[in-house]
Amino acid sequence: MRHIHRFFVSQPLIAGQRVPLAEEDSFHAGRVLRLRQGDAIELAGGDGRVFAARIVMNSGRVVQAEALAEMEDSRSDVVLTVAQALPQGRKLDLVVEKLSEIGVSRLSPFFAEKSAPKRGKELVQKLERWRRIARAAAGQSRRSRVMDIDAPVELPEWLASFTGGVVVLSTEVVAEPLWRAAEAAGTPLALMVGPESGFSEDEIRLLGSTGACFAGLGKNVLRTETAALVAASILLHRMGELG
């Protein structure tokens, strides 16, 4: 059976509507995949509805597609935010790709006191790259939406902006099992993963003062990028999104 590629557009779709693919998607569809007029694809609209579609024009630089019939509802009501302390190097690239694949709704990178990366112009380019990675991963795994990725902010700023329950993966304090902490935190839910060197004492006090629930993953200590994927997978499974 031939694989049908999925592309994302920002606007909601209706049957019969013709839309151009984004510049990067047009290049990928036309130059890399070599899709031609009449080839079948799928289009996911900005409201999460997915349509069977076909290529109707390929000019070499612009690819246009027509939405045909809406597919079986693949939208998910599960909402999970992951707040990830910025790790070293390109580790967040892997975090972005895998969290997008499994269905995390939003990734919120933040600066912790022990974070290696600091503010700088290079973060603008990194944010653009992370969003491209999330988009590609969502298409590959046939998600109905692309995971949102926020610009990195300081930890206190993120805490002030999030209105929901926060579960913090922590080895610095006595913690509850992840599933129990998540039930206590309620919804909407955010999973917070700290930096490689852990949270500072001031950050632990701040998180405790906001009512965050501290959680653990058992006896083993995982790398920050591994912990994000493992914990998010567990939570999405319990929320009915995986498995």
Image (cartoon, rainbow, N blue to C red):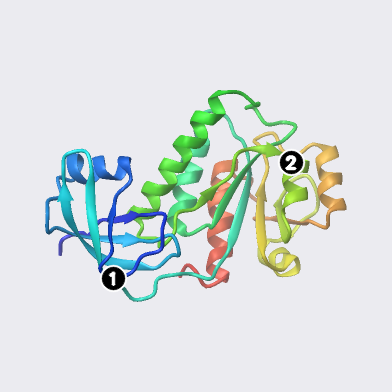
Tag 2: amino acid = Leu
- Relative to 58, residue 66 above or below: below
Q: Which residue is mark 1?
A: 15
Residue 154: x and y, percent?
Answer: 72, 37
Query: Toward which corner of the image does residue 80 lie, by quadrant?
Result: bottom right
Q: Which residue is mark 2?
A: 155
Do we see residue 237 in this rendering?
Answer: yes
Badge 1 crowding class, 10 Å Cα cut-off, few under 14, some 14 to 19, many 20 or more, is few
Q: In the picture, which quadrant includes the C terminus?
A: bottom left
- Specify the label residue 176 is tagged with: none
**Which SS class for mark 1?**
loop
Tag 1: amino acid = Ala
Residue 210: x and y, percent?
Answer: 84, 54
- Relative to 114, residue 192 above or below: below
Residue in the image at 23% along x and 52% along y? 64
Residue 205: x and y, percent?
Answer: 86, 45
Residue in the image at 39% along x and 68% along y? 49
Given this view, does label 1 or label 2 mark the residue nearer the observer?
1
The residue closer to the viewer here, 77 or 222, is 77
First of labels 1, 2 by sequence position: 1
Residue in the image at 36% along x and 57% along y? 141
The residue closer to the viewer here, 85 or 127, is 127
Q: Is residue 115 left or right of residue 18?
A: right
Q: Residue furthest bottom?
A: 72
Q: Is residue 16 left or right of residue 58?
A: right
